[in-house]
Amino acid sequence: MAPSSQQVIDEIRRIARQELELERPVDAGDELIRDLQLDSLGLTILAVGLEDRFRVKLTEDDSARVSTVADLANLVARRAAEEKA
Amino acid sequence: MKGPPAPKPKFSNLTEALAAAARSHCGLTFVNMREEEQRLPWSEAYHRARRAASALMKLGVRAGDRVAIILPTAPSFIDAFFGVLLAGAIPVPLYPPVRLGRLDEYYAATARMIRLVGARLVVSDARLRRLLGKAIEASRPELGCCTADSLMAGGEEAEARPHELCLIQFSSGSTVDPKPVALSQENLVAQCAILNAHINASATLREVGVSWLPLYHDMGLIGCLLSAVYYPAPLVLIPPENFLARPALWLRAISRHRGTASASPSFGYSLCNHRIRDEELEGVDLSCWRIALNGAEPVSVQAMRTFARRFGRWGFKAQALTPGYGLAEATLAVTYCAPERPVQAMSVDPLELAREGRVRSGSFEIASVGMPVAGVEVEVRDARGESLPDRRVGRIFMRGPSVMAGYFGNPIGTARAVVAGWLDTGDLGFIHRGELYVCGRTKDLVIIRGANHQPQEFEACVDPLEGVRTGCVVALGFTPEGADGEQLLILAERSAIGPADLEERIRKAVLDGTGVRAHTVKILEPGTLPRTSSGKMRRREALRRFLAAELRPPQPVNVVRLAGRLVQSALAYAKIELGHES
């Protein structure tokens, strides 16, 4: 079954805590760059981590559509549903 | 000081080396995130490259044309790179975009690099090609952009026709003022011969390389890929983004393939220290890893020590850690430590070093980057160009067979960098007991995680902020005590009325604009930063003063002088008013 946006958000939280060692809590409305202060290394870790976990491919131009945690979660959930279909 | 005599290269150009590798039984292995592997023997890589060369010639690529290659670490990169080479054109590998990263700057930087080398064609893949549209539009390569796959469509194989120029590499990360370093076939085979002589000190061992380094960067492309072709040796390649996301992939691949040689900048070692969990290394045995090169950015003693301690449990040998020093303009390596000996470090007084350029013992550890590699000579010189005695800090110069042919299309820049065969590295260091220690640089460059950034990239983000004095900001790289790599330092003067959260705003603006996090942001009183007589910021002097704790605001204007000024300006006003009245 394709993951829900909420499941993706949970995974983003896990990556933020365990892989990126982010100390602040992560909210759906947080912007990846402005609020979470992710640099290019952090963004790569997040993108590749989500791809690996949910077996989706994020393309480089997805960044144009993604600014918040919720945007990213929705995108990954949608991609995963498309892959299943 | 001088390295041993240069070894005589086995080949006169890289295409000969590839043809010879094709007769061996080894080749490349690509590892993905799930550790599934794809093999590409050199023999097959050679045939594919000849097909690509034939297709490129049909497209209209001529001898000496520059062809930009924007591809991830995948077989398609190998096809395109060697195809261009065999076709007698000059490959120019450029970095692909970062996922979820900022694209506008990427387009601009890529377009600039394509224009700078006058690339006639861009080779990419289907996924990236859609994305590159804007960069292609802005740079207009005559033959447009094709995919590497399309080069495989025809069955014909071309004969190699090597060009005298072999490769143009940009020093990584630089976006404001990228310098295309042109390397000749001679440069390349000389460098490969040097690296082979160094790594394969005992000829009975067969080397196995493992690398996660990007192929658009000198250490990954020349140090790993091309030297494996030259050797020829088996080489395992991990895409850099996969390594960043899961550093254990690197160590697991070394263990699985019994890797003997693998390189990384310091930050790769510290990424492993921080992000690998013990359970990811179950069954891993690193005792095969004979040479763990460390270069491309300032070598962190701390990161190496932690790495050796942490991974000793899995058979890693501390003496495998081999610091080195090099730069794109020297093709790659300038100095390397002798293999299989413990890392040598000196504890110096950082204040004395910054203030006087003298080495005295203290608390700051600097690693030796070793002796000149074969065929290379190194000198440390003072500002007048005189050679300095040991333990005195000066500019590092080097000469040898792998000093670049020149900056492509920039004879003035070349003449400035290379004088009478000596390359001015722009780095600062000192010699102690026949070994080089690098401790700073004179060129304005910030090196973070192996990527070179121009300070202007960061300064441009800060300058427009409200509360920052216009033009009064400098970005610098420095290694904080206890940190395991170079970090970003921002020094900014505030304007008369600055917002209270100025530091936070600066941090956000830098991260937002460049994707790099500032380590230290220091807000200074107006007039604190050192300037030239024409008012330009003196970045290196600012750093020296910061490190030497000498950054002080200008002499406070005393009350009497202030009163004098007030009187003067009052007089001036009075005069103006009088003028109006009359």
Image: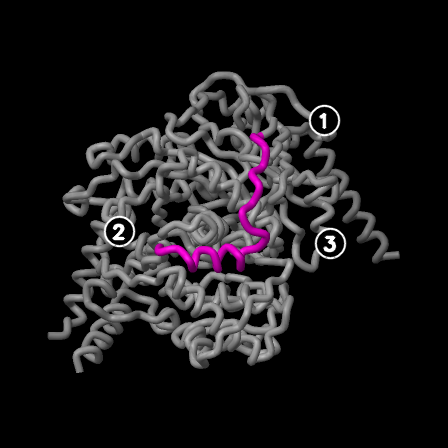
Residue shown at 64% from the left, 35% from the top:
B397
Label 3 – label 2 distance at C-alpha:
43 Å
What residue is disc 1 on? B386
Kindly indicate whether the residues beneath marks 1 and 2 are on one polypeptide chain: yes
| Label ID, residue B521 | none
Q: Is residue B542 visible?
A: no
The residue range painted magenta reads: B3-26
Q: Position of residue B7 (x, y in %)?
A: 56, 38
Outermost residue, front direction? B23
Amino acid type, callout 3: Pro
Among numbered discs 1 and 2, the one appearing first in the sequence: 2
Residue shown at 55% from the left, 32% from the top:
B372
Amino acid type, callout 2: Leu
What residue is disc 2 on? B249
* Element assignment for label 3: helix
Front one among A14 and B66 = B66
Among numbered discs 3 and 2, the one appearing first in the sequence: 2
Position above or below: B551 against B147: above
Outermost residue, bottom direction? A85
Label 1 – label 2 distance at C-alpha:
48 Å
Amino acid type, callout 1: Glu
Q: Position of residue B413 (x, y in %)?
A: 70, 51
What residue is disc 3 on? B411
CB atoms at circles 1 and 3 under 8 Å apart? no
Q: Position of residue B274 (x, y in %)?
A: 27, 42
